[in-house]
Amino acid sequence: MGKVVCPWNLITDFVTDAFVGYGVPREDAEICTDVLLESDKRGIESHGCNRFKPIYIDRIVAGIQQPTTNFEIIKETETTAVVDGHDGMGQVIGKKAMQMAIDKAKKYGLGMVAVRNSCHYGIAGYYATQATQQGCIGMTGTNARPSVAPTWGVEGMFGTNPFTIGIPTDEKFDFIFDCATSITQNGKIEYYERIKEDVHPGTIIGIDGEAVEGDAGVALKRIREGSAALTTLGGIGEALGGYKGYGFALTVELLSAALQDGLYGKDLNGKDADGNLKPYQLGHFFIAIDADHFLGEDVLRKKAGDILRSMRASKKAPGADRIYTAGEKEYEIWKEREPHGVPINEAVQAEINQVRDKLGLSYTFPWEDNYVPYEKDEKIISHIENK
């Protein structure tokens, strides 16, 4: 059957009800759903419905992630805060922490919040967009389970560690630069395994120092067992600048752990000394810079837009149709998907059916013979809007 498109209102209501069914308070469940589906709206399928059950639901069931979120402020000043998430829902922790940073920036110009003991918080670009929509430059990063090797190393010592920046523009889309500091990420390898696509050459290094290629499922297993690791931006060695990706990754690790005295590196592998599952206890950081404390939001948006347009108008390489700037492709994917819904592959369809049946929810989906078209629900709110 392959991928089947599921309407936004249907998948939104189902995912929210499923989170509630597993103990997440409804207000928090709506935040979790919003972050999750924002990934699919932008075409980042590795972090959307693809991760709904295995990353969030399964971890709640396993008892290593708390469905109710205790957002505890450990220390706070006018411009900074340190927060303990107590292994709650990463999306809830992330949204609240970024809003704290934004509120501080609106009053004092800049705000930063450091978080410890959190869980996977979804796509980092969601929080950068949260800032740009409120007239701020937004930055965020997170550490993650160790799966990436340092330059000249073969052992997974730190996570894919995205370093994400959002800058407001006067265009229909803001500048949202959201990517891992590794060439690829665990979620992408998981996605390749689901769709039966081989790993891309040069993205994974074996314990013998050679590139790992071929079956994504085998590669993923090797990463998990420690006989292979992802590579940083620039790839294996230093010839193509792998040390630069390593430096950016380590910067994120430091900002995600050092300010809040959080865990780092191999302590984030989700296992205790006896190999039993335990909370991941991730660290995040959120930074907001208010444009009105400089020359104003309108000035920033206009100048940023001018800079981006100059890039796209520059001379193109032979055979290239166009030059993009960060956030543009995601915006176009959203405009294409907005009227229809999210494409869901067969593996995720089965997981959705499983969760529904387990909870006894009365939903039918487009991939089922008994599907009944879902009544239109106007409550869907996109975080990529025309400005």
Image (tube, rainbow, N blue to C red):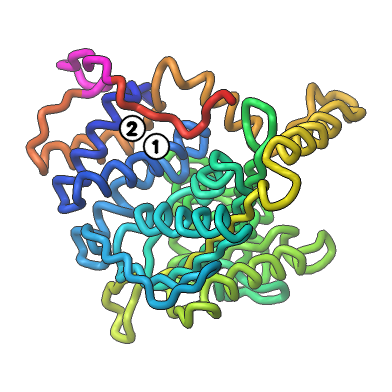
| Above or below for 133 versus 273 | above
Residue position marked by numbered label 1 in the rendering:
37
Q: Secondary structure at mark 2?
A: helix
Structural distance between the alpha carbons of marks 1 and 2: 18 Å
| Above or below for 372 versus 85 | above
Residue range of the region highlighted in magenta in the rendering = 365-377
Give the percent coordinates (x, y) of residue 295. Answer: 75, 46
Residue 72: in magenta span: no
Residue 370: in magenta span: yes
Give the percent coordinates (x, y) of residue 139. Answer: 60, 55
| Quarter of the N terminus within the rendering | top left
Instruction: Indicate the amino acid at tag 2.
Output: Glu
Question: Which residue is rendered at x = 76% and y = 33% of the image?
Answer: 302
**Quarter holding residue 351:** top left
Q: Please tell me how crowded label 2 is: few (under 14), some (14-19), or many (20+) other residues with Cα within 10 Å.
A: some
Judge depth for marks 1 and 2 and give the one in front: 1
Question: Which residue is rendered at x = 42% and y = 52% of the image?
Answer: 95
